[in-house]
């Protein structure tokens, strides 16, 4: 278990995840957080900032520094940017730490007061939690599980564009797990609600923390079983079955959505090769 209140030493080389308003500072030469010894960097006095130890990345400590949006004290280190920019680097471990930093900053900013009695909360010094001394209510960082699934029908893959997607970007289906619901039920329900079809042979592929603001994506591939495609107009702008060799613009490498699409592409290519 990590110690969230561990403080960095002035001569300790570390990764610095400086977050404000949901964005973090990235270097100007490439989309990476600053790295180095605080004593040798253009840092303000860190004793004035809340710092949380995040863990280690390649034998270097990682620290979250909570700043105010528009804070100019870190201007020489880089500029505030979207965590998604880290995906362009192709470093999944770095993105995972950045996701943790963003999710913890979200947790601390939204749990300053008790949700049960309204009294100011206090940080727990030995674990990452907020505690109310009035009613003894304790809160931990929220994690919202979501399913995300790539569905194939022969050589075709189901892709759709949600209302929040950039123009021209298509992805796989996804949806939140509801209270009291098993993951396999979520999978079947979300696909039916969003696309009007039944699926079979779901296979777990992997997970990814997705800090927008606190999701955990649980990835699957599956096969079409029955039903005509009928998209939910409240959730999706457009969608269709796309030939695996003629895909539209899809999510960046490094995202679990792209990993699922690539997984199906590999399976389809192997089947085609085996048939000779």
Image (spheres, grey):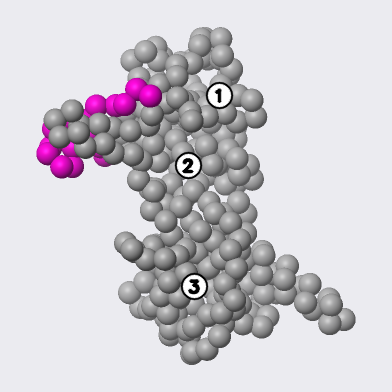
**Is residue 118 shown in magenta?**
yes
Please name whichever residue, 31 or 147, is drawn nearer the observer in this view of the structure.
147
User: Foreground mark, 1 or 3?
Assistant: 1
Q: CA distance from mark 2 to mark 1?
A: 16 Å
Q: Residue at image x 46%, y 39%?
A: 100
SS at mark 2 in the image: helix
Q: CA distance from mark 3 to mark 2?
A: 25 Å
Relative depth, front residue between 66 and 205? 205
Mark 3, secondary structure of its residue: strand
Instruction: Looking at this view, name the residue that lies furthest to the right.
Output: 276
Of the image marks 1 and 3, the number of the one nearer the N terminus: 1
Name the residue located 39 percent from the left edge and 36 percent from the top edge. Answer: 104
Nearer to the camera, 250 or 168: 250
In magenta stretch: residue 26: no
Which picture quadrant has residue 36? Answer: top right
Up-down: is 159 above or below 107? Answer: below
Q: Which residue is mark 2?
A: 99
In the picture, measured across the screen, residue 154 lies left or right of residue 35, that is: right
N-terminal label among 3 and 2? 2
Q: Which residues are magenta?
A: 109-126
Q: Which mark is residue 160?
A: 3
Residue beneath label 1, please?
61
Q: Quadrant of residue 46?
A: top left
């Amino acid at each position: 278990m990590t110690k969230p209140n561990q403080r960095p030493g002035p001569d300790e080389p570390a990764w610095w995840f400086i977050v404000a308003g949901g964005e973090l500072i990235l270097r100007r030469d490439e989309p990476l957080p600053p790295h180095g010894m605080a004593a040798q960097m253009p840092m303000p006095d860190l004793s004035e900032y809340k710092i949380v130890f995040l863990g280690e990345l390649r034998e270097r400590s990682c620290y979250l520094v909570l700043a105010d949006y528009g804070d100019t004290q870190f201007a020489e280190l880089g500029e505030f940017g979207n965590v998604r920019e880290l995906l362009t680097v192709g470093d999944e471990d770095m993105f995972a730490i950045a996701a943790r930093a963003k999710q913890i900053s979200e947790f601390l900013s939204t749990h300053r007061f008790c949700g049960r009695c309204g009294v100011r909360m206090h940080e727990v010094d030995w674990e990452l939690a907020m505690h109310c001394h009035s009613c003894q209510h304790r809160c931990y960082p929220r994690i919202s599980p979501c399913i995300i699934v790539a569905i194939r029908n022969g050589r075709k893959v189901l892709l759709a564009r949600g209302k929040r997607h950039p123009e021209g970007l298509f992805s796989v289906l996804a949806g939140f797990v509801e209270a009291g619901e098993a993951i396999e039920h979520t999978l079947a329900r979300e696909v039916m609600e969003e696309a009007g079809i039944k699926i079979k042979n779901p296979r777990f592929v992997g997970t990814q923390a997705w800090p927008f603001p606190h999701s955990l994506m649980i990835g699957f591939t599956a096969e079409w079983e029955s039903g005509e495609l009928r998209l939910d107009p409240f959730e999706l702008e457009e969608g269709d079955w796309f030939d695996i060799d003629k895909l539209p613009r899809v999510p960046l490498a490094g995202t679990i959505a792209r990993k699922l699409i690539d997984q199906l592409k590999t399976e389809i290519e192997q089947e085609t090769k085996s048939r000779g």
